[in-house]
Amino acid sequence: MTWILSKLASLLPFQWYFVGAAGLALVSYGGTQTWRLHTAEAQAATAKAETTAVRGQWSSQVSAAASAAFAASEKYRALEAQMNLKVQESEHARQVDQDASARAAAAFAAERAGLRNQLAAYAAGPASGGGLTLDTLGACHQRAAALGVGLASALQSEEDLTDELERSRADTRSLLRAWPQVAPRTVSESERGDDDSS
């Protein structure tokens, strides 16, 4: 090979040596640049593949977080719907109880007025034609004793009802004390300082 190059060199003028050397340098430079370009393309493809893999992981994590948030939101909505239903049922039951209590109170008031009139007529005794009563002392004592028994029975019923009412009030107070209370959230000093700085 050297012999061929030496024969070619003798045939070529001197300036062609420089052209050949420049051509050889140019071919060498082009080969180096081609190798660098190929290496850069390989690195870019690797970086693109890594970026795609990271984006895929991030996308799956975001999707999983969104699914978890949606599931938690649906669970909260279901609990809220149940609580609202219970509140509505409780309000309806309370209204039914209030209506029943109002009817019972009206019936008791009417009965009390009727009993008052009957007691007044009984206490007065049988009336004669001119407004005077035809009554004996023994009959007055019997009516007074009967009225005393009726009054004692009424007072005992009132005492029993008062005891039952007080027990109901005590039960209600203990239930209200035991019911979970939502306390207002207080802002700590560090949070207050963070809010001021932003």
Image (cartoon, helix red, strand yellow):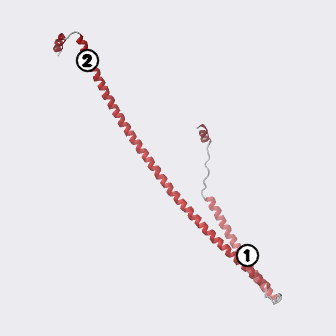
Q: CA distance from mark 1 to mark 2?
A: 130 Å
Residue in front for this viewpoint, 19 or 114: 19
Crowdedness of circle 1 by 10 Å Cα count: few (<14), some, many (20+)? few
Residue at the image point whose x is 54% and y is 62% from the top: 85
Q: Position of residue 16 (x, y in %)?
A: 23, 12
Q: Is residue 7 left or right of residue 96?
A: left
Lower sequence index among marks 1 and 2: 2
Q: Is residue 168 above or below residue 17?
A: below
User: Which label number is shown at residue 191?
Assistant: none
Local crowd size for mark 2, using a 10 Å CA cut-off: few (<14), some (14–19), many (≥20):
few
Q: Residue at x 65, y 67 (%)?
A: 168
Which quarter of the rendering shows the N terminus?
top left
**136 displayed left or right of 167:** right
Instruction: Tell me the mark number nearer the camera, choosing from 1 and 2.
Output: 2
Three-letter amino acid code of the residue under disc 1: Leu
Q: Pinpoint residue 8: horizontal percent, then vertical percent.
A: 17, 13
Name the residue that disc number 1 marks.
Answer: 155
State the image coordinates of residue 53 (x, y, percent, origin top left). Answer: 37, 39
Residue 25's spot in the image, x, y percent? 27, 17
Q: Quadrant of the C terminus?
A: top right
Q: Give the vertical position of 12 relative to 149 (above or below).
A: above
**Amino acid type for the residue under numbered disc 2:** Gly
- Name the residue beneath numbered marker 2: 23
Q: Nearer the viewer, residue 119 or 158?
A: 119
Against 178, residue 128 (above or below) is below
Give the camera-side residue of 66 and 164: 66
Q: Residue at x 80, y 86 (%)?
A: 140
Label 1: element kind: helix
- SS at badge 2: helix
